[in-house]
Image (cartoon, helix red, strand yellow):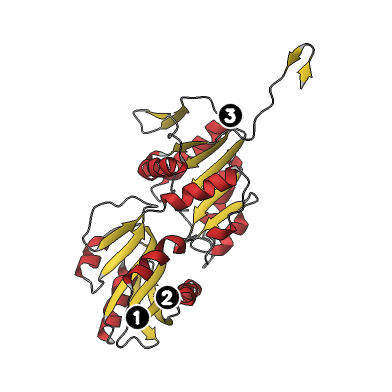
Amino acid sequence: MWFGNKKLTMPNSNTEAKIFACSQSRELAEEIAAAYGVSLGNVITSTYSDGEFQPSYEESIRGTRIFIIGSTHPGPENLMEMLLMIDAAKRASARHITAVLPYFGWARQDRKDKPRVPIAAKLVAKMLEAAGATRIITMDLHADQIQGFFEKPVDHLFASTVFLPYLKELNLDNLTIASPDMGGSKRAYAYSKFLESDVVICYKQRKKANVISHMELIGNVEGKNVVLVDDMVDTAGTLTKAADLMMEKGALSVRAICTHPILSGSAYERIENSKLEELIVTNTIPLRKESKKVRVLTCADLFADVMHKVHHNNSISSKFLM
């Protein structure tokens, strides 16, 4: 395109994307960038004495697609950093701003389950859009319908593409997939379909959040190698109680696969003292400490592949195993 006697250079959609990291997900972001084939972008964060912080892009992002990687698990500074990174990118004239949230925090508040409470998941979705995100990539949302809280495209990935090859390598006889609660039955049935296994479900009642008053088992686990499937593990109360119950009912072994290892409070102690043989998680959230019973599988290759396909406008449907 010419303007007078000068040729104007139009933005090139084939220019490679840039990847940046929020501080809480820097280690995962470095893995993703390496798998993608680019260097992680340069961001510095200045912090005031009162705790206020300001991220700054130390390279030009004008007219480019950028991916900002950061899980938004509590505390609130993780979400705030993502919002500030998006806002800074918008004001620096980035062409496309994709928020990559390996773990979408605040997702358990996805509905009003009693009067006078917020729907935090929708609030977070609106905040991300208001800040300037043009696309969202995340994995294993607490509830699928959270995608409907966004007006922008959402790529909802499944950790089954990471977990299923590992489970197949274990080559367990008499495999049974279990859901630790009624809400996770859809996920359990999806895994059982691929593994051609039976399914059992735990029915639990709570006194309050993170406190189980009663648990029953629906199905037979006697002589079975059981794998519990869930989207997250927080205090590990449900998982460890379910594992102990299944061993009492005659299971040969109990493992658990959980995408997001929040592992708060006494979670590590519960896992160490439980009948769980191992807890398999991804690295969407960095572990607070190591444990001989916790095995981490990386999701970096999955995110890198999807980000590359998104940038080059290729289909990602092959990544949806569930």
Residue 214 badge: 1
- Camera-side residue of 35 and 182: 35
**Foreground: disc 3 or disc 1:** 3
Q: Position of residue 205 (x, y in %)?
A: 40, 78
Q: CA distance from mark 2 to mark 1?
A: 12 Å
Q: What amino acid is found at the position of numbered circle 1 in the picture?
A: His
Judge by depth and name the residue closer to the eye, 192 or 125. Answer: 192
Q: Residue at x 36, y 80 (%)?
A: 175
Task: Please indicate whether residue 22 sits to the left or right of residue 239 in the image.
Answer: right
Q: CA distance from mark 2 to mark 3?
A: 44 Å
Between marks 3 and 1, how big is the CA–CA gap? 52 Å
Quickly name the residue at label 3.
91
Q: Quadrant location of residue 21?
A: top left
Q: Are marks 2 and 3 in contact (CB under 8 Å)?
A: no
Mark 2 neighbour class, 10 Å CA radius: few under 14, some 14 to 19, many 20 or more: many
Q: Position of residue 134 (x, y in %)?
A: 61, 43
Identity of the residue furthest to the right in this view: 4
Please tell me whether mark 1 sits on a helix, a strand or a loop. strand
Q: How many marks?
A: 3
Q: Residue at x 44, y 75 (%)?
A: 195
Q: Earlier in the sequence, mark 2 or mark 1?
A: 2
As drawn, is 140 to the left or to the right of 227? right
Q: Amino acid at mark 2?
A: Asp
The outermost residue toward the top is 5
Circle 2 is placed at which residue position?
Answer: 181
Q: Position of residue 203 (x, y in %)?
A: 41, 80
